[in-house]
Structures are given as structure tokens and as C-alpha cells.
Image: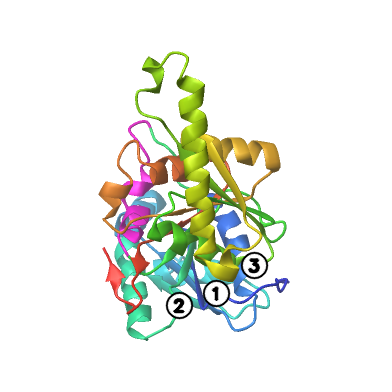
Amino acid sequence: MSETTSGPAPATVVLATDLGPRCDRAAARAQRLAARPGTVAIAASAVEPSRAQARDTIRGDAPAWYRPPSPAAEAERRLRQDLAGDVDWDVRVAEAPAGEHLSGLLDALAHDGRDDDPLVVAGPVREGVLGPTVLGSTVDRLLRRADLSLLLVRRRAYADYRRVLVASDFSEPSRRALCRARALFPDARVTLLHGFTVPMLGLMDGSRDDALAQARRQLREEGEAFLRTLGSAGAGIELLVEAGDPARLAQQHVETYGTELVVVGTHGRGAMYELAVGSVARRIVTSVDADTLVVRGWRDPQGRDAR
């Protein structure tokens, strides 16, 4: 039975699942989010043509009474069974590449003229031997869009998020990410984290500590000004300005405070730019041991997508 959670409803929650065991936690989190009154709940899954062919090959000879199920019908049955409860899910299953299926679904939602970007909920991204394999396919394709927020779920959904960390460079995309997180999880305690480095710090002698202290003071003033521009959305937010890599600092915050969600905004320049080796977004998504929310792009006051 789904539990209705507190806070305003996301306009649309889209669960993207391959029905594998790694997506169970994403499905449970999506159930909690979709249980909020007024939420449009969509569950999407795709049967890749290569997977269907491989399954048919494995079956081999079959008894005369055997009737092979339609791959899409079987996937829809499993998905409805997994999501059984109080939420009225609109189940969308297709025999197609997952990226194409999800993109088509999101395009249709955009054409419906909805006021809010959909919240897409999916399983976690993992590092492969040569890099994050999933980022090169479905998730990478989603991150090319400017009209969604992507929640990647690693942890079990025991309760609503209580501690949220927003990694910020005080930019417009960071503002959008922070506002989106506060709107989705208004009861959570929010911390804004800015990690910084001082150029040529390793070459400094006795002035090293002074340079760090000066940079921290200046950036803290910038962070406080950034929060003031948010008005009520910036109230009650803790500001942390620390020297170091933001992804490493985010993981340390998770380990110290039990932070359940880390939020990052991206600048809308395309997934290959944002998730290139060494980028903050990529390192947070692939390495931090917590759920992560990626808020794509930003919109100007006239509502146009900036890329």
C-alpha cells in the first residue's frame, strides 16, 4: 500500500525501469513521490529488440502446448504487478530501444503544455571498466534534454528525504536546481555546498593559509548574496564553503550527516560537455553513495529553454 507523502506534488513523475533488480529501489521511491495527491504517474519500460531475440534463442525447442507471450505484454504485466497499490499508474511499454521510447514519451508530455518539467526516476549509474556504461545510452540521452529533472536512486526508500545537499557554483543552473529541490522536498533540511580551489596554491609558502581564508571569505559572501536573491526559497538553508573537490566533499557530507539526496544543476550544453571526464556533475552522479537529482538546463523569465 502506497503512503501519501507530505509536500506539494510534482506535476508528473515518470518511472523509467528495465524491470531489473537494480530498478526496484527506483520504483519504490517513485511510488512515494507519485502518491502525492494531484501527481500524474507514468511508468515506462522498453523491451529492446536484441533482448527479445536473445530470449527466443535461449528457449529452443518447446512443447506443443507452449504459447510464447508477447514481450511487450509480458513486460507490462510484470510492471503492473510490481507497481500494484494505491497509485494509478499510466503504464507505457514498447518494443523499442529504451532511449527512443522514453524520448518519445517525454516529447508527447512536452506537447501537452504542462507547466512543470517531469521528474524522471531511474536506477543508479555505475562506473564501468571504461567509464559509466549507462551514461553512454539511455541516461545520457535523457541528460541531453532541457525539460526534465532526473532522480537516480541508489538507496531504499524508507521515508521522505530528510537531508538534501545541493552542490552549487552560484550560477543560474544552480539556482534552478536548488529551487527544484525545495519545491519537491519542502520538509527536508537543505545544505548548499560550494567546493573551491585556489590556483597555484601548491606553490605558495607561508601565504597558503591566508589565500585559502581570503577565498573562503569572498566565496561565502557570494554564497550569502546568492541565497538572498532566492527570497523565501533561500530561507533556512545552511551554506558550506569548503576547499576541495565538490564530489569528494559531497561524499564526505553523506558519510558524516547521513545525507540522502545530492542535487546538481547542469548548464544545458549537452551531456558530452557536462559529463566529460572530470566534470562535477559526472563525478557526483557516478561516485556519491546517495540518491542524486540532476536538474537539467534552465529557463529564462520568458520560459524559453537556454542551452
Q: Sort mark 2 into few (<14), some (14-19) or many (20+) by Cα contacts within 10 Å.
A: few
User: Quick check: 41 left or right of 48?
Assistant: right
Q: Please tell me which of labels 3 and 1 falls first in the chain.
A: 1
Q: Position of residue 6 (x, y in %)?
A: 70, 72
Check the image and report above or below for 7 versus 218: below
Instruction: Tell me the residue at 32%/37% (across/down).
Output: 277
Instruction: Tell me the residue at 51%/78% (across/down).
Output: 11
Query: Quarter holding the C terminus?
Result: bottom left
Q: Nearer the viewer, mark 3 or mark 2?
A: 3
Going by the numbered disc 2, the residue's amino acid type is Asp
Instruction: Tell me the residue at 49%/65% (across/down).
Output: 229
Task: For marks 3 and 2, give the CA distance.
Answer: 16 Å
Q: Are marks 2 and 1 in contact (CB under 8 Å)?
A: yes
Q: Position of residue 43 (x, y in %)?
A: 49, 71
Numbered marks: total: 3
> Disc 2 marks which residue?
116
Depth check, front residue: 288 or 16: 288
Query: Does the magenta run of residues contain 144?
Result: yes
> Disc 1 marks which residue?
10
Check the image and report above or below for 1 versus 137: below
Going by the numbered disc 3, the residue's amino acid type is Pro
* Residue 293 visible in the picture: yes
Depth check, front residue: 233 or 289: 233
> Disc 3 marks which residue?
186
Query: Quarter holding the N terminus?
Result: bottom right
Magenta segment boundaries in residue numbering:
129-145
Depth check, front residue: 30 or 161: 161
Depth check, front residue: 209 or 148: 209
Going by the numbered disc 1, the residue's amino acid type is Pro
